[in-house]
Amino acid sequence: MVLKTFGWSFAVTALGLAAAVFYGGWTGFGIVAILSILEISLSFDNAVVNAGILKKMSAFWQKIFLTVGVLIAVFGMRLVFPVVIVAITAGIGPVEAVDLALNDKDMYQQLVTDAHPAIAAFGGMFLLMIFLDFIFEDRDIKWLAWLERPLAKLGKIDMLSACIALIALLITSMTFAANAHQHGGAHVDKAQTVLVSGIAGLITYMIVGGLSGYFENRLEEEEEAEHEAEEEAKKSGKPVSAVVMAGKAAFFMFLYLEVLDASFSFDGVIGAFAITNDIVLMALGLGIGAMYVRSLTVYLVRQGTLDDYVYLEHGAHYAIGALAVILLVTIQYEIHEVITGLVGVVLIAWSFWSSVRRNKRLEREGSTAEA
């Protein structure tokens, strides 16, 4: 089971580390290994949230997530994305951006650092909306009941999540602008960029999340319709339209997963510059880490871990909320990657421990009832 799920990750690790030695010697090997660990530690909460969505998808789409999805995650977000960001923010062509990444690494790092406020605003808003929509939803199972009960009541107010997110964005951009004025106004234009990027993150969440949620709600009905249509197709020999609908539902859920992964990867990409500004080593290290996160997601789904440890999903969403706040704070202040990673790990470990305690309590109550 472990080899079947993590086989691709092991293979990518071996190839990635070999390529690192070939490209940068044993120093390159060490940097790639550290970056892999960094990515896994920062993205464990990503795997838990992904698993909650992926368990509703078929085995086919789980394979797509592990194959096509990995190409998007590794090459798209960890290699192409930083180059595209540099090209856009610096107003240069993609070829020039690649040339900078390979031949003028210090300038490339500076340009990516300059683009950080826009990246953090977009990713922070997207993740904040995920967290807010989670905590404002009334759930049968509550982890921190003293907090989640009143928040669920507040959640009955329409558009509350969007209002709170926009208020957070306004405070962030206004604080950034005020500090820019105090320091000579060098970053006043960037304050506007932060506002626009944050709104773009909110719009992206609403479009992709809204579509995936719509199709997710209809998925069960479509599966029933598909079954009925298949019976009719056997008699008539005509193609079944319900299959297209089910495929559309899975596609939008897959798209939502990819945007979610992209938002999670922002802190990893930015944090990687604290270790190296070599784009090749960065792509190798973060790519290996991203592969393990994906394998871990599938492992959690196939083992039914989220069903056995019911508070894990809660812990992961609280970690998302913490990461969203951290991303927005890093627009103005520097926060070490170790803190970012530890916050997520602590929240998930706490939720896991709470789940274990709950399971033991239920076992005791079951034994008492039988006696």
Image (cartoon, grey):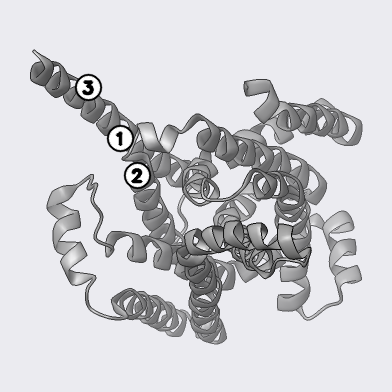
Spatial separation of the CA atoms under disc 3 and disc 2: 19 Å
Disc 3 marks a residue whose amino acid type is Lys
Q: Is residue 75 left or right of residue 110?
A: right
Q: Is residue 354 above or below residue 213?
A: above
Residue highlighted by disc 3: 360
Q: Is residue 34 above or below residue 132?
A: above
Q: Residue at x 25, y 26 (%)?
A: 359
Q: Secondary structure at mark 3?
A: helix
Q: Is residue 312 left or right of residue 10?
A: left
Residue highlighted by disc 2: 315
Going from N to C along the chain, the mark reached first, 1 or 3, is 1
Quarter of the image containing the N terminus?
top right
Quarter of the image containing the C terminus?
top left
Q: Residue at x 69, y 30 (%)?
A: 33
Residue highlighted by disc 1: 350
Q: Secondary structure at mark 1?
A: helix
Disc 2 marks a residue whose amino acid type is Gly
